[in-house]
Amino acid sequence: MTLRTIKSTKFMSGAEIAEESDARLDSLNNEIRITKDNTHKQKLINLRNRLQHHSSETFANIIYASQQQEIKYVEIKHLIDNYKLLAESKKLNPDDVYFITINCCEGHINKKPYFVAPKDLANFNVKTSKNTIIKQLRGLGTAFGYVAFEVKYDIRMGAFLPHFHILICGISKKNIEDYFTCLYPLEYQFKLNRDTFIVSKKNDPLIYERPQKLKVVDIETVKDSEKVASYMCKFKTYMTNYQQQDLTALPYSEKRQDYHTRPEDKIHNYHLLFLDKLSFGEQVFCFNKGLLTNFINNKADKMAQNCIRIAKRGKKTGKLGKKAPNHNTYAKPISTNKIVLQFLKYDSYKPKQEKIIDYIKDHKSCIVIQPTNFGKSLCYYASALQLKGLCVVIEPLVSLIYDQVSKLNKIHKKLALAFTGETKHRDKKLKRLKRGIYKFLYIAPEMLKNIELKKVLSKLDICMIAIDEAHCIDVWGEDFRPDYQEPLNKLIKKYPDAKVMALTATAGDITQNVIKKVCNMPKKAKVFKGNLNRPNIKYSVVKKEYDGLQQLLDTLKPYLDKDNKPTTSIIIYCAHIDYTLGLQDILKERGINSYVFNGKSDNKKEILKKFKKEKCIVLATSAFGMGIDKPDVHLVIHFEGTYNLEMYYQESGRVGRDGENSKAVLFYSDIDIERMTYFAKNDTMKEKLKLAIKYMQMTNNKKRREFLLNSIV
């Protein structure tokens, strides 16, 4: 027996799911209008209200159910694929993977299948049946796998037949058949009373003879593991809409008045009430969990060795690990904030996040000024996902772009695209972008002048433009990176219907005005300001004596052990590349090791990886750390004075993200101030430098903190 075409939620399009969602509401409305049973009517009204608002955590909601299916589908497909890859190292027969279907039973040797009258379905106790099957599966000591539960409406019987689908690994077909035949004969006839749905005596005039088979399908005969995984997750489809027969799900036909006809509204709605009461654990669960966990967590070196052996034999190994599911959010936006959470696999919104998301639904633009760890990215994720078209995200650094894109694409396949100055695969990326595959496009401001990209964008629906780290528009925009201003302004004006959201952790009045001007926002554009005070950070300023090196060593000393190794992660910011290299040599002479990260570093990715994993000292220029969330940085030092308090707050804010007491220390000298005054060319820079100098020269730390916070929002 082989597995043929399977129709399940995995293979349903977004349009089909939406259509099914509407059909469920129509069915509920139809019955609500005609039913005279007030108790039953109220149940239907309550369910309809939850489905209208796309309430999560009810499998009657096809959207929620399909999203949950994707999660379990990936796990099961991963198990099937890796079983074959790891069979040799686990000393298992790679053919020993089987799919079994059995009817829900009472656990007796002489099996009595449950046939459930529709009106009794919502009271059907899944837990009893689940506990029975778990106990039975423990008898297969060396086997492990997944169990999926569903009910199927039988029109001839006028009842629901509950049954389990079981994926079994690690045991032979003969052992499975020998074991299950004791509980479920391979093939037999049972006599069923149509009124009571219980097994009856042979001479009962109401009996109905029904053939019964135990189906044991060797997965090795099925080449497409996606179909097996999808079939295991078929519980998340609209169960009464499809009928299993020889492991093939056939759709109901309105024209065919036979076994495959879709049930009437009343039957349909009993089924929805049943789905509404089920939990995830009742829908799919694993058995012999220890064996399953040990199998999935097999040592990486064994997995790699086995894959190499298979590759040498010319077989396709494929990619290991979980694959992200597909999406269609460019053409079909998500309808509610709650469904966005499920889509992105977030638990909940912060109150202010949802306020921002709801605001932008009805308005053209806003500025979001919120502290580190607030989750500013989720604000534009959730907003854009509820709009039709592409969201263009402007990021200042390529490292930030790839970090964000990687994060989104792990959640959903091809959700985001990075288009940078790299020439590799550029044409391929543009073709995919043009087809409306992606929801988010991440670019640096310099890419706004790319002619090829501009041509593609002109043919797409641009629903939102998000400017991350928006303070860079002002800090870097005039001299250092002019593309932050004029090209960005042109882009926003070219797409007047697109929403615009500028996000940053710091922006004083001057910077806010620059952002509004460049982003074509009205002067009274809404600004969502958060509380930027982080009481666990102690801010202090040190005026250098001579070259300040001894003061630097004194500041570092409490954070070093007896071998001069750091006990926490430390960042030392320097204004110049030469300073980072010079300080590294000075520290090394005193037995203190450190890494250097600057614009000329060839091993930036390697340093970032070490910084994330180790307790270390990094000597860096200003770009380092932007967008990196490392909780155990407890000391940040700026070894030269600052000319911009907003930038200083951003960089010092990389300390104390775990909530522990931490220090931000700013060194300065009169020479630093003279140098910065010389380079302050325009009124804006001079105004910001004036505030920075006042901050550095203050003597009262409490007032210094207040002054800093007042200067950055």
Image: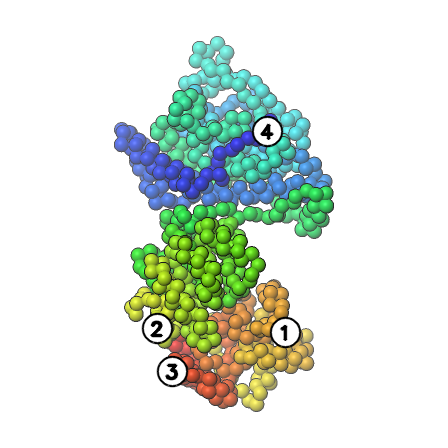
> Seen in the image, is 491 located left or right of residue 634?
left
* Residues at marks 3 and 2, CA–CA distance in whole angstroms: 14 Å
| Element assignment for label 1 | loop
Looking at the image, tell me whether mark 3 or mark 2 is earlier in sequence order: 2
Q: Earlier in the sequence, mark 1 or mark 3?
A: 1
Q: Where does label 1 land, which residue? A: 594
Q: Position of residue 712 (x, y in %)?
A: 40, 74
Give the x, y percent position of residue 336: 37, 49
Quadrant placement of the N terminus: top right
Which mark lies nearer to you, 4 or 1? 4
Label 3: few (<14), some or many (≥20) within 10 Å? few
Disc 3 element: helix
Q: Which residue is mark 3?
A: 683
Mark 1 against mark 3, which lies toward the viewer? Answer: 3
Visible residue check, residue 124: no
Q: Position of residue 503 (x, y in %)?
A: 41, 65
Q: Which mark is residue 2?
A: 4
Q: Are marks 1 and 3 in contact (CB under 8 Å)?
A: no
* Residue 480 - label: none
Q: Earlier in the sequence, mark 2 or mark 1?
A: 2
Query: At label 2, which amino acid type do we have?
Result: Asn
Q: In the drawing, does residue 419 fall left or right of residue 566? A: left
Q: Amino acid at mark 3?
A: Asp
- Circles 2, 1 touching at the beta carbon (< 8 Å): no
Mark 2 crowdedness (10 Å alpha carbons): few <14, some 14-19, many ≥20: some
Q: CA distance from mark 4 to mark 1?
A: 61 Å
